[in-house]
Image (cartoon, rainbow, N blue to C red):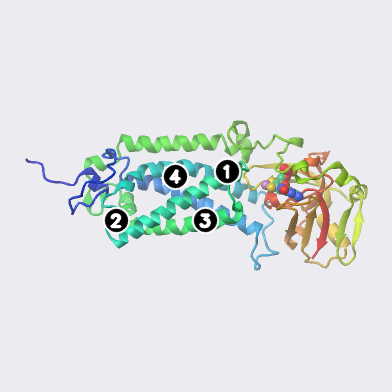
Amino acid sequence: MDTPPGPTPEARAGLSSPTRAPRRPLLRPPGFAGRLHDPRTATAVGRWLGAAFAVCFLTGLVSHFLQEPPAWAAGYLPTRPVWGYRLTQGLHVGVGIAAIVLLFVKLWAVYPRLFVWPPVRSARHALERLSVAVLVTAALFEVLTGLLNIAEWYPWPFPFVPTHYAVAWVVAGSVLLHLALKAPEIRAHWSRGSVGTRALPDEERDGPDRRALLLGMGAAVGAVTVTTVGQSFAPLAPLDLLAPRHPGHGPQGLPVNRTAAAAGVTAVTVRDWRLEVSGPRPYRLTRAELAAWPQHRVRLPLACVEGWSAHAEWTGVRIRELVERAGAPPGSALRVVSLEAAGAYRVMEMGREYVEDPLTLLALRLNGEVLSADHGYPARIIAPNRPGVLQTKWVARLEVR
Ligand SMILES: Nc1nc2c(c(=O)[nH]1)N[C@H]1C(S)=C(S)[C@@H](COP(=O)(O)O)O[C@H]1N2
Ligand SMILES: [Mo]
């Protein structure tokens, strides 16, 4: 009878309205009295998740920008550093994998709020719950489609790239809205030791349970990162146990995304191969004639959109020289067409910045050997700081634009 009628732990966690006696919920949640489901834990996990999503969003924009440059940027994309895309896409996939752990810890910390009673208190509360539903759905959609994409498994009817890109904007928008709505809790978290102007009671300070949760989360992120990041970060390649690709595994020491067989490129297709170059002065070359041109050797990465990447040594003819011989005026762009009969990457557009770059080759050899069929024999494109999808294999035709 001496105890003051203070708020219950649920009420402090915002689980029920302290002003009105709650009616009995239809679904009675399990006991959520601990600190692991309170706003402070949600905020502590949320800032890591927010940072991870920010990295994924920005690196995703880079990838989109390089693959489909807006008209104003066409011709001015950065070709240096040559490993730029390798870094940003490695981050995109690596941080995206870590975000799966963070997202599930965050959802676990806040899931008691699914059971708040009454489910809707006001119009504002309804909108807030709706915005969280959109955020959670879009975030789960992004990490799960991203994860299946790195395994190249597409068990859905929509195209991956435009959908993943569009939903990223939904996530970005709903994260910003969520941050605005949760500003009071976030502010309370950063002004450690106090909530608003009120001093924190002892049981709300970070205790061993919350610290253990955050440490466990860090350990899980570390474990998934260390066992997958080797697909793009060479020093950790030996620990790459869980990623779908291993940078050193594949013909000529490099993975293959689409094999010659899958692309329908056979010995018959390439038997009478000629490189066709169209332009003011069109011409054709056999492979032997190409090999008689000045050969250049470059060390450039192949950086796949799916996250794996590796440097290799490529030997071949400068695209610039092939294009000049066709009488192309300076500043010409190029369309590259593959022998492949069908496929999303059969036709590739190359802006003048890559055409003019001395490192951009029509490669005939990889790591000192003649290109294998799966790496694009008779000839393939290799250009600096470009997504792997644009490094066209089995080149048939160069069209000066
Ligand atoms: N013609 C053609 N070129 C292509 C592809 C393709 O499907 N068709 N796949 C691209 C992708 S997604 C990547 S990552 C690189 C991989 O090159 P590699 O198989 O030699 O490692 O090739 C690219 N070149
Ligand atoms: Mo790729």
Element under label 3? Answer: helix
Q: Can residue 91 be seen in this snapshot? A: no
| Quadrant of the drawing holding the N terminus | top left
Q: Nearer the viewer, mark 2 or mark 3?
A: 2
- Could you tell which of marks 1 and 3 lies nearer the N-terminus? 1
Q: Given contact means CB atoms under 8 Å apart, are the residues at marks 1 and 4 in contact?
A: no
Q: Which mark is residue 266?
A: none
C-alpha span from label 2 to label 3:
27 Å
C-alpha span from label 3 to label 4:
16 Å
Label 1 belongs to which residue? 148
| 399 relative position to 196: left or right | right
Outermost residue toward the front in this view? 26
Q: Nearer the viewer, residue 9 or 58?
A: 9
Which residue is at 27% across, 48% downward?
15
Which residue is at 74% across, 57% downward?
348
Label 2 belongs to which residue? 120
Q: Give percent across and percent down for residue 158.
A: 59, 53
User: Does the closest atom of ligand 2 sit within 8 Å of the Cβ of label 4?
Assistant: no
Label 4 belongs to which residue? 103
